[in-house]
Image (spheres, rainbow, N blue to C red):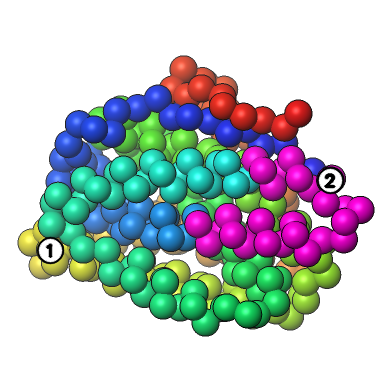
Amino acid sequence: MTELVVRRLLIDLETPVRRHWCGGDAFHSAFFNALSMSFPVGEQFFIDSVRNGLKVLPADQQAAWRDEVQGFIGQEATHRRIHGLFNAHLEQHGLINHWERRARERLKQLDGLDPRHSLAITAANEHFTALFAEWLLGQADFFRDTEPRLKTLWLWHSAEEAEHKSTAFDLYQALGGSEAWRLKWMRRVTVIFLTDTLRQTVSNLRRDGTLWQWNTWTSAAHFLLGRGGMLRSNIKPWRDYFRADFHPSHQHSALSATWLRENAGNYTVVGQPA
């Protein structure tokens, strides 16, 4: 079992957020805005999936899982709330959240299915977020020119994603989830996640008026595909998910624990396992 602490982030999200808040870079801002737009509906789905998975565990196993599930739900609920506040600023910039609408329509198709399907989808998404989180935590200078409160927001979220990346995966395994379906859902989630990220980022750039600026495209190429870029750096870790012996803990690093320890003044602990 993983001990998961629920934290309340101590940052101001009432002060307006600049349009190009991420170091003044239009692409970086549009990309992270797109991710943030997915979080409220996505985090709620993850919460529901893990909660429902706990309910169908045999009664004699539920007690062993309860603390970890409660910690997972607490962390994800906090992420959902914080990004809801952040997204309200994006609306003020005239950005439209198409990702959430599409996600809600797709999720309706899961109604009535075995809850292990939702857990497999959650585990696949958590693998993506954990990979990106580890990458971001390892980029010491990425947020160098970003105001501290927003740098803290994204690195705190990244640290907690890395911390709870095994919960849905382990619960899926505990429920006897099929290996074939684990891999099939990862393939589907890969296509959906990357497509939705691209579509929402392009929409954000179009609304921002920076889609066809040369600097936007050079920034995108460097960020995603350059040496050490986000996508390029994560191809191998993503591929590892398809190994028969894969477990999220195999990709463990100390970055999450280090950030949480060194930035303890930016949050308060509001809950943890008994």
Q: Earlier in the sequence, mark 2 or mark 1?
A: 2
Q: Give the quarter of the figure containing the N terminus.
A: top right
Decide: is 101 above or below 22. below
Is residue 144 at all visible to an observer of this figure? no
Residue carrying label 2: 63
Left or right side of 87 for 210: left
Query: x, y (%) of residue 224?
Result: 36, 60
The image shows residue 178 at horizontal and vertical percentages of: 78, 76
Instruction: Give me the residue at 58% from left, 34% from top.
Output: 6
Snapshot quadrant of residue 96: bottom left
Q: Is residue 194 magenta?
A: no
The number of numbered discs placed on residues in the rendered structure image is: 2
Q: In the displayed structure, would residue 242 be above or below residue 180?
A: above
Q: Which residues are magenta?
A: 44-71
Q: Residue at x 76, y 28 (%)?
A: 274
Residue ID at (53%, 38%) = 159
Q: Amino acid at mark 1?
A: Arg
Residue 125 sits in quarter: bottom right
Residue 4: tell me if it is visible: yes
Q: Residue 90 in the image: x percent, y percent?
A: 21, 51
Give the number of the disc on residue 207. Answer: 1
Q: Secondary structure at mark 2?
A: helix
**Disc assigned to residue 101:** none
Position in image of residue 212 (x %, y %): 10, 67
With 2 as the anchor, is 82 left or right in this view? left
Q: Are marks 2 and 1 in contact (CB under 8 Å)?
A: no
- How dense is the environment of label 1, judged by Cα within 10 Å: few (below 14), some, or many (20 and up)? some
